[in-house]
Image: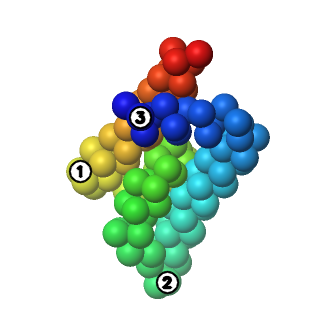
Amino acid sequence: MELLTAAGAWLAGHTAAAVLLLAALNLASFALYGADKRRAVRGGRRIPERTLLLSAALFGGAGALAGMYVFRHKTKHVKFTVLVPAAAAAQLALLLAAVGTYLAGD
């Protein structure tokens, strides 16, 4: 609980930085999915699945999920259709919990 309070406090004090950081991570994840789809179509060297999933897990879940459906990439792979939405949901829950815990403490 203390970690959530600390995270919420940091977010409250660094809102612009937090938004920019999350936007950058999600944009990077989205771009990775687009680049891998392009490489798949052209027969080029692929981005490892591990890298794609890691980008989703490291606070790029929303970008990865958007990339999957915008580029129609990895949408038939069970591990992607389960893990990427789970990562996005977990990240949203953590963010909401951190902010909620911080606001409740005020």
Q: How many angstroms separate mark 2 from mark 3 (CA)?
A: 47 Å
Check if mark 2's residue and mark 3's residue have beta carbons within 8 Å: no
Farthest bottom residue in view: 45
Tell me the residue that label 3 is attached to: 2
**Does residue 56 appear to the left or right of 20 in the view shown?**
left
- How was this image coloured? rainbow
Tell me the residue that label 1 is attached to: 78
- Looking at the rendering, which quadrant does residue 82 occupy? top left
Q: Which quadrant of the rendered structure holds the N terminus? A: top left
Q: Is residue 7 above or below residue 53?
A: above
Neighbor class of circle 2 (other Cα within 10 Å; few <14, some 14-19, many 20+) is: few
| Residue nearest the observer in this picture, 54 or 81 | 54
- For label 2, the SS is loop
Q: Amino acid at mark 3?
A: Glu
Foreground label between 2 and 1:
1
Question: Residue 74 location in percent, x, y?
Answer: 37, 56
Neighbor class of circle 3 (other Cα within 10 Å; few <14, some 14-19, many 20+) is: few
Is residue 94 visible to us here? no
Check if mark 2's residue and mark 1's residue have beta carbons within 8 Å: no
Q: What residue is rendered at 45% in x and 75% in y?
A: 47
Farthest right residue in view: 16
Q: Amino acid at mark 1?
A: Val
Q: Is residue 80 above or below residue 39?
A: above
Neighbor class of circle 1 (other Cα within 10 Å; few <14, some 14-19, many 20+) is: few
- Looking at the rendering, which quadrant does residue 12 occupy? top right
Q: Is residue 52 above or below residue 14?
A: below
Tell me the residue that label 2 is attached to: 44
Q: Amino acid at mark 2?
A: Gly
Question: Residue 11 location in percent, x, y?
Answer: 63, 37
Foreground label between 3 and 1:
3
